[in-house]
Image (cartoon, helix red, strand yellow):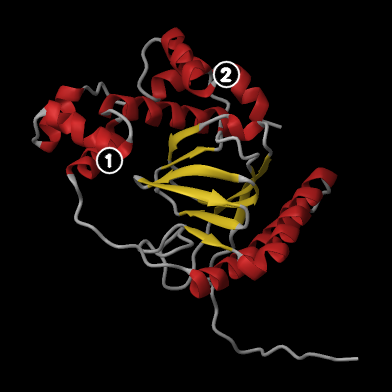
Amino acid sequence: MLQYFMPHKYKHILNRDCTPKLEYFCKVDEVSSVMPRAMHVHENLVEVLLVYEGSGIYTIDNNKYIAKKGDLIFYNSGVVHDEFGGNGSNLGTYCLGISNLKIVKLGNNKIIEDNYCPIINCNEYFDDILSMFDIIRKSIDVDGIHVAEFSNFLVQALVVKFRIIIEKNGDVKQIKEPSLATKVKIYIDKNYNENISLKSIAEAVNANQYYLSHIFKEETGFSPMQYVTRRRIGEAQNLLINTQLSITEIAANVGYNNSNYFQNVFKKIVGYTPGSYRKRWQV
């Protein structure tokens, strides 16, 4: 028999004044993953995805990635991202939403350095990570009175493991000067719920609107107004999942004065009406 003794003095990863909290947890199987999750952002929490099966397409901060089985995907607070699993690869993911996270030497609700690639493979840690996600899922299914406390402690352990993986396997991204398309994206991200037009975007970034449209689509795959629509629908998805606001209120929040028009646009992009989408995601 072997007995191991743990050191009582060690370098802390988590700030001891903050306790991370699990805000939500979901398992997205191959059926649900075909529903696109349009451009959206989480202002007050970190999101971490584990790809446990297949592969999917992810746009993160204007960069497109393909994530495969064994990959962890890290979204810091405030990072715009788009998730689309519909490439015929039977994508399956686990997702954690974590608030009140403060890692030593990083800002509030940041889990990865800004200059690191946000997708990192678990490699030899995959089985351990998957098991911990499974334990959280099973504990939630049981619905015990202490499930929140139990899950929060598991999340702390997962965050420590995530940081071990990031520090060991993380890749530094090449930092580029902001392009015209990036400036347009930043402007839209701040103003998508306003009465925005191609003309107003062009005036804001001091560029010809036709040249701007060409450059933006070449870099992002969307026209500026298509991107506006995806940001609006992505935020609407957030509100449908995480609030009890009415569909009319959500439409107004994301920049649509006409609720019927909003519902038509939503169904065209997501494949479901807002009401049906909410029922599929809320427990």
Q: Quadrant of residue 154?
A: bottom right
Residue 240, x across and y down, in percent: 55, 27
Q: Which one is in front in this view, the residue at disc 2 or the one at disc 1?
A: 1
Going by the image, does 122 lie left or right of 183?
Answer: right
Residue 139, x across and y down, in percent: 80, 51
What SS does tag 1 mark? helix
Nearer the observer, 36 or 47: 36
Question: Callout 1: 10 Å neighbours few (<14), some, many (20+)?
Answer: some
Asked whether residue 139 appears in the rendered view, the answer is: yes
Residue designated by label 2? 272
**Amino acid type, callout 1:** Glu
Residue lying at the far right in this picture: please name it: 1
Q: Is residue 10 above or below residue 219?
A: below
Residue 65, x across and y down, in percent: 44, 48
Label 2 – label 1 distance at C-alpha:
28 Å
Label at residue 219: 1
Nearer the observer, 186 or 178: 178
Going by the image, does 176 lie left or right of 75?
Answer: left
